[in-house]
Image (spheres, rainbow, N blue to C red):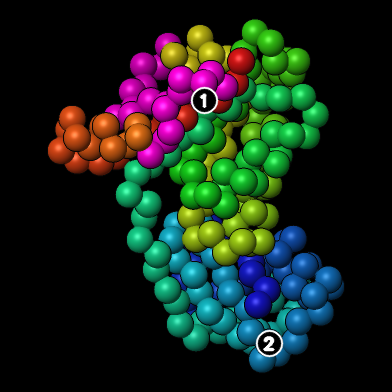
């Protein structure tokens, strides 16, 4: 079944309306017609099962048959990822989205090649957010992560954000398995962590 994305503010059953790129994809690429079945993700846990109602030049309307709500992940995971060379970051965002990451923060560290001004950082964030949208449409993940604008490591640390559990990716032989980290936290606090920060990079 073909999947589309609409932000929560635009999801008002019993009729959903696709416009812009989503309408173009439905009309001109997939050539959907009245009665065809599709689903719409709102990125906030809801999946709307619909049938195509009308196909116009500028919009496609969908009749909602039913919708499902997915429970939020038990832990809100933030991926703090040093930006690698080339387009590898797009693949990382795609896979992190598929795994249910809640937020992705691209980090500009000392050894990161990319150098961006504020406008360039916002452009990158917009482009990478679009990658995350395509990823949920591809795999059916009901939760869309927020992709932040790239930020330097000192600038992020200066914000003072704390996580219940902070993990640092390591290639060393004495590193812990992620499962062991969660089990240790739960044993110490008698609960699971609600927020997790996963730091990856040099």
| Residue 171 inside the magenta-drawn segment | yes
Residue 10 seen in this snapshot: no
Q: Residue furthest right?
A: 28
Which of the pair 176/168 is nearer the observer? 176
Report x, y in % for residue 157.
44, 14
Q: Which residue carries the number 1 mark? A: 169
Report x, y in % for residue 3.
64, 69
Residue drawn 42% across the image and 73% down it: 68
Which of the pair 160/170 is nearer the observer? 170
Classify 10 Å Cα crowding around label 1: few (below 14), some (14-19), many (20 and above). Answer: few
Q: Earlier in the sequence, mark 2 or mark 1?
A: 2
Q: Residue furthest front?
A: 173
Q: Are marks 2 and 1 in contact (CB under 8 Å)?
A: no
Instruction: Using residue 159 as the reference point, say whether residue 86 is left or right of it.
Output: right
What is the quadrant of residue 152 in the picture? top right
Against 102, is 109 above or below? Answer: above
Residue 109 seen in this snapshot: yes
Report x, y in % for residue 132.
62, 48
Q: Give the magenta range.
A: 158-179
- SS label for mark 2: loop
Which of the pair 182/75 is nearer the observer? 182
Report x, y in % for residue 4.
64, 67
Instruction: Using residue 161 as the reference point, say whether residue 2 is left or right of it.
Output: right
- Tag on residue 36? 2
Residue drawn 38% across the image and 25% down it: 166
Which of the pair 130/173 is nearer the observer? 173
């Amino acid at each position: 079944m073909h999947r589309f994305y609409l932000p929560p503010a635009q999801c008002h059953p019993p009729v959903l309306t696709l416009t812009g790129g989503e309408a173009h994809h439905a009309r001109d690429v997939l050539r959907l017609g009245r009665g065809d079945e599709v689903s719409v993700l709102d990125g906030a846990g809801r999946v709307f099962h619909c049938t195509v109602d009308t196909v116009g030049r500028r919009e496609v309307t969908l009749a909602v048959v039913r919708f499902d709500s997915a429970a939020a992940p038990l832990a809100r995971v933030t991926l703090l990822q040093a930006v690698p060379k080339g387009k590898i970051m797009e693949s990382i965002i795609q896979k992190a989205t598929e795994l249910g990451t809640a937020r992705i923060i691209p980090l500009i560290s000392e050894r990161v090649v990319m150098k961006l001004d504020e406008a360039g950082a916002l452009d990158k964030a917009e482009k990478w957010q679009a990658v995350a949208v395509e990823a949920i449409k591809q795999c059916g993940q009901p939760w869309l992560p927020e992709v932040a604008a790239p930020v330097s490591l000192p600038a992020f640390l200066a914000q003072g954000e704390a996580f219940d559990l902070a993990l640092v990716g390591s290639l060393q032989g004495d590193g812990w398995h992620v499962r062991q980290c969660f089990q240790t936290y739960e044993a110490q606090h008698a609960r699971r962590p609600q927020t997790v920060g996963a730091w990856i990079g040099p």
